[in-house]
Amino acid sequence: MKKIALAIALIGSTCSASVLAQNSEVNPSWYIAPSLNYTNTDNGFGLTKNGQGLGLRFGKMLNQSWDIQLGGIAARTKQSGTTYKQNLLSVDALYLQSREAVRPFLLFSVGGQHDKLSNALKTTSKSSPFVGAGIGLQAALTEQLTLQADVRRNMAYVSGNDYNFNRAYTTYASVGLNYFFDKVAKPAPVVVPTPA
C-alpha cells in the first residue's frame, strides 16, 4: 500500500508541474471516466496473487465540494488453476478540498459486487453489498480532460456459506482519465457602445 500511495503522489507532483500555472475553470458538465485498476483480493478466496481490472464510470460535479460518480469495475485474478472474477457497480461520492488544477479528494462508496471463484472441481459465485472509502487526486490536463488516481478499500457483506467467511475486503488502486462532454461556458463579450 505504501508503494501505491507513493505512485499516486508522484503522479500528482508530475502533473502539478504542468498545470499549477493554469487558472483552472470548473467544468460542470457530465464526464466519462475509464480507468485501469490493480486489485488486492481478500485472502479468504484462497488466492494470494493480485489482479487487474478495467473500470468505467460517469460523473458530474454537484457543487464546489462534491462530485458524484456512477459505474463499475471488472477485475480478474488467476493462480494455480483457479480463476477469481469480481464485478462491481457502485455510487461514489468524492469530497474535493478545492477546485484548483490539482485537487486531492476523499472518496465514499456504496454498491454491490459479484464474486465468482472457479477451478477444475467446482464453481462458486455470490453477489454481496459493500461499502468503501478511499483517497485520491484529480489533475486538470486540458479544459475537457482530467487525470484521476485513487486508492479505495471496499468491505463486502458476504452472506451464506458459499465462501465460509462473512466479510470480504478488496483494495483497488486506479488510474484513469475523466473526459468532459462539454467545454466550460465562456462569458459573453462585453460590447462597448461607440460614442455618437
Image: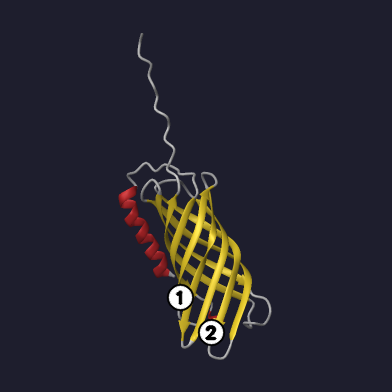
Q: Find disc 2 in the rendering and name its residue.
A: 46
Q: Is residue 183 above or below residue 86?
A: above
Question: On the picture, is 121 further left or further right than 105?
Answer: right
Q: Is residue 105 above or below residue 184?
A: below
Q: Nearer the viewer, mark 1 or mark 2?
A: 1
* Outermost residue toward the top in this view: 196
Secondary structure at badge 1 equals strand
Residue type at tag 1: Gly
Secondary structure at badge 2 equals loop
Residue 51: give its label: 1
Q: Is residue 152 above or below residue 193?
A: below
Residue 52 in the image: state x and y as whole percent: 44, 73
At 36% from the left edge and 8% from the top edge, which residue is drawn? 196
Residue type at tag 2: Gly
Question: On the picture, is 129 further left or further right than 79?
Answer: right
Residue 141 in the image: state x and y as whole percent: 36, 51
Q: Nearer the viewer, residue 37 or 48?
A: 37
Give neighbour class at mark 1: few <14, some 14-19, many 20+ (Cα, 10 Å): many
* Outermost residue toward the right in this view: 160
Q: CA distance from mark 1 to mark 2?
A: 13 Å
* Outermost residue toward the front in this view: 181
Residue 94: give its label: none
At 39% from the left edge and 22% from the top edge, which residue is drawn? 191
Would you identify the image quadrant in which residue 45 lies? bottom right
Q: Nearer the viewer, residue 142 or 165?
A: 142
Would you identify the image quadrant in which residue 123 lies? bottom right
* Outermost residue toward the left in this view: 18
Residue 5 in the image: state x and y as whole percent: 42, 65
Would you identify the image quadrant in which residue 183 lies? top left
Residue 101 in the image: state x and y as whole percent: 39, 47
